[in-house]
Image (spheres, grey):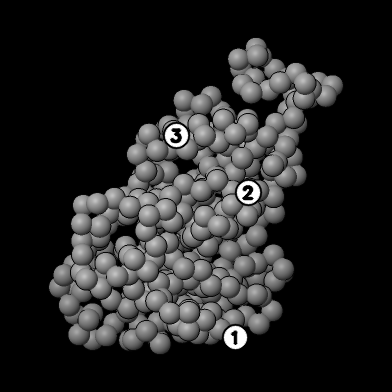
Amino acid sequence: MCVRCVPLRGSPRERGNITESKRKGSYQTMKVAIATDTNSGMTREKAREQGIYLLPMPVIIEDKMYLEGTDITSAQLYEAMHQHQTISSSQPSPGQILEFWDGILQDGYDEIVYIPMSSGLSNSCCNAIRFSQEYEGKVQVVDNHRISVTQETSVQCAQKLAGQGMGAKEIREYLEQRAYDASIYITVDSMEYLKKGGRITPAAAAFATVLNLKPVLTIQGDKLDVYTKARGMKQAETKMIEAVRQDRLTRFGEVPDSQLRVETAGTFESEEQAQRWRQLVQAEFPTIPVSYVQLPCSIACHVGINAAGTGIVKKEA
């Protein structure tokens, strides 16, 4: 539970859920909830432990919709991929988003900070911003151009800021001002899902497959770009680690290790594969603890099985 104090202004209707019993002098205690979606990589269990509200993202398999973490797991998605079923990601309906926010307000919160995935990667953020206008400032949607582990860092930062007394609007502004203090690099083992998603042509996918070429993609802000190419997964992993090392020395050169997170992620099917990748990155950054998270289903739909990623992000609070 997070609180802040704001001046009492306007009519009781404009003050929303504020009650006179909480009034202290000319200020009012407000409860601020932090919410995100499963694109952050947060699980239901982790979100519950940290007091975060989590909206499950839809995944479509053979024209049937599943909600991540509710009625589909990563393992089930990978099995569908092995069976070459038709798979795509989707976004929550307006009704799902509004019901999600209304439920949070009914829990007794006065304001919501909602942190979806980057607007450059999905329309869900822009739609959420439009829907939030119905709430007269009670819902603040953050577009800080992140996804996966960097998005989760923003969620944790927002929770900390709310606990320190910052309001929803101020938290949104704080996070958006620091949106680009992060980098993500990712490579794929198979071109199949990049081809299906229209990110590469069938001819380019076939050419890359024959030559065992692996694209190294990067997310630094609004969109997914090709960073470089590699011959095989081992070389691709090396190039990603080199990219993060370069970011550490340049973009984050004056930031102490204690204020940085270096993370690994992937769509590996075994814990052994995941830990091998984590340990490889950890060896390059021995003074910064490195953890591993499974990429959410909504991302796995586009990168396939055995994709690997790593990133660096500045802790914002």
Residue type (three-letter) at the residue carrying disc 2:
Gly
Expressed as whole percent of the image width and height from the top left, the position of residue 177 reads 59, 47
Nearer the camera: disc 2 or disc 1: 2
Question: Which residue has dot 3 on it?
Answer: 99
- Label pair 3/1, CB-CB below 8 angstroms: no
69 vs 185, nearest the viewer = 69
Sooner in the amino-acid sequence: mark 2 or mark 3? 2
Q: Which mark is residue 16?
A: none
Q: Circle 1 sits in a helix, a strand or a loop, which is it?
A: helix
Quadrant placement of the N terminus: top right
Q: Residue at x 51, y 65 (%)?
A: 183
Q: Where is residue 188 in the image (x, y as percent from the top left)?
A: 34, 74
Q: Residue 283 carries which label?
A: 1
Residue denoted by label 2:
51
The residue sitting at 27% across, 85% down in the picture is 212
| Cα distance in 3D space between marks 2 and 1 | 33 Å
Which residue shows up at 64% across the image and 20% down it? 15
